[in-house]
Structure formats: C-alpha cells, structure tokens
Image (cartoon, rainbow, N blue to C red):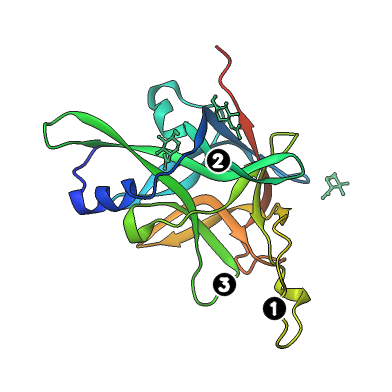
Amino acid sequence: MKFQLPSLLLGLAASAASAQNQTGPFYLQIVGQKNSSIMGYGNSCHTGAGMEGLCYGPGQVPESIVASFEYYFNYTGNTVVDDAQVGQVIWKLPYTDSNGNTALEPQTLGLQFTTDSNVASTNFGLGECSSDLNVGFDADGKLFAWNYIDDSTFTPGTNPVPSGVGKAYYQWYVCYIYYTGYYYQAIGWSATSPPHNPTCQPVDIIQVFPSS
Ligand SMILES: *[C@@H]1O[C@H](CO)[C@@H](O)[C@H](O)[C@H]1NC(C)=O
Ligand SMILES: *[C@@H]1O[C@H](CO)[C@@H](O)[C@H](O)[C@H]1NC(C)=O
Ligand SMILES: *[C@@H]1O[C@H](CO)[C@@H](O)[C@H](O)[C@H]1NC(C)=O
C-alpha cells in the first residue's frame, strides 16, 4: 500500500535518528503458548494514515506481500540485558515521494494503551503517533520488552535509583483489537496478567531470518 505522507511528519520522524546499528530484514514468527492453534507471522496492517498495527497472519509468509512481513532492529550498544542488545523494532513504510517515486520511511514499534484496559495495541507510527518501545531478542530469538524500573518496589518519597540494567519482560498476546474504527487480530501487550481483553491468547514472538 502506498500513499502520500505530509512532509512535516516525515521531518519529525527523521530527526530522531542517531548513531545506531541495524540488523534485518527478518520475520516475526508468532507461536501460541499452551495448546493454542496460533502459528503464523507478524505483518504491518493499515490502521490509519501512516499508522499500522503489528497484525497476526496465520500460516507462512505470503511471497506476494513479503515487504509487510519484513522488520529491522536498531540498537546503539548502550543497553544490554542478559547479553541481548536493547533497541527498537522498525518497519519501513513505503510511500510516494514528491517526485512520484517509491520511498521507504522507517517507523518504530510502540504501544498504545486505552483508559480502561491493561492491554496495549502495537503500533508503527510517525511523529506524535510514534513511540519507541525498548525491545530486544534473547538467546532463543524471542522478542522481549525492556524496562529498568519496577514500580511494585517503590516506597513513598524514595527515588528508586534505577540500576540501569533493567529486565526483559514477555507479555505478548494475540488479541482482537479495536483501534480507530478497525477491529483486527494483532499483537497486544498485557501490562499485568490476566489480560482485560478476553480474546487475548499468550504467544511467543520469534526472530526468523529468511534462509537465502
Ligand atoms: C536505524 O539505524 C540505521 C542504520 O544505522 C539508520 O540509518 C536509521 O536512521 C536508524 N533509525 C531508524 C528509525 O531507522
Ligand atoms: C493441552 O491439551 C491436553 C489435551 O486436551 C490437556 O490434557 C492439557 O492439559 C492441555 N494443556 C494446557 C497447558 O492447557
Ligand atoms: C556496530 O557496527 C559496527 C560496524 O559493523 C561494529 O564495529 C560495532 O561493533 C557494532 N556495534 C555493536 C554494539 O554491535
């Protein structure tokens, strides 16, 4: 899918770049836990102008639309947990530039919560619609999200003084998600367990490099 992007949004997204290493492209394989029938791949699906969700597609990666299934990982080398780099997952949005050529705009994976649920939707967006989620791939290739502060350990008035090491969390689900009028099956993140959304099924997300 291609469409015009406002140049203001592109400028905002580009200004976030700094010295980073990138790996990819790779696929995000989605495997259900327990006796789940979920088995497929993540793909970027349209959820608004310049916005995509990380959708669940059952089965294999379809060769005709492979670009929607290809992701990249950016990291600076500054943050490591259990020997795994912490960085961002990126999808490259195709768009038509001012000369009518196809160009790619990188978008980072983020989470969006609503007021009344512990389940966030996953989103790739531009400008104020983007939020960088800190993630990485562990020794088994499993996608984790990283945070360095655990508010369950807080005491009144005492700054928790983060160690800077942080922890890897695995709270991925495949859920039916409602977002800007769309209702679709996609990756969700449940901040606590169990998820408020009864359609959520726990999954692992695994980095798979195409064999070739
Ligand atoms: C990711 O890393 C690449 C390679 O260093 C860089 O060109 C790009 O600006 C970085 N950020 C994003 C969001 O792609
Ligand atoms: C998986 O299914 C089997 C057979 O139906 C059942 O015995 C087992 O308890 C299930 N395991 C889980 C984790 O739900
Ligand atoms: C980033 O890439 C450069 C060039 O390949 C390499 O020398 C460096 O070790 C990489 N940094 C990390 C943290 O992997």
Q: Which of marks 3 and 1 is nearer the N terminus?
A: 3
- Disc ID at residue 75: 2
Seen at 51% across and 67% down, the residue is 113
Real-space Cα separation, disc 3 to disc 2, in angstroms: 30 Å
Q: Say above or below: 30 vs 120.
A: above
The picture places residue 42, in percent across and down from the top left corner, at: 53, 39
Q: Residues within 10 Å of mark 3 (few under 14, many from 20)?
A: few
Q: Can residue 196 be seen in this view?
A: yes
Q: Quadrant of the C terminus?
A: top right
Residue lying furthest top in this view? 212
Residue labelled with disc 3: 117
Q: Earlier in the sequence, mark 3 or mark 2?
A: 2
Q: Does the residue labelled 2 lie within 8 Å of ligand 3?
A: yes
Q: In this view, does 186 lie to the left or right of 17?
A: right
**Quadrant of the displayed image that contains ligand 1:** top left
Q: Say above or below: 165 vs 70.
A: below
The picture places residue 99, in percent across and down from the top left corner, at: 11, 32
* Cβ atoms at labels 2 and 1 below 8 Å apart: no
- The residue mark sitting in front, 2 or 1, is 1
Real-space Cα separation, disc 3 to disc 1, in angstroms: 28 Å
The picture places residue 18, in percent across and down from the top left corner, at: 43, 43
Residue labelled with disc 1: 159
Q: Nearer the viewer, residue 22 or 199?
A: 22
Name the image quarter holding residue 188: bottom right
Q: Say above or below: 168 vs 118.
A: above
Q: What element carries label 3?
A: loop
Q: How crowded is mark 1: few (under 14 residues within 10 Å), some or many (20 or more)?
A: few
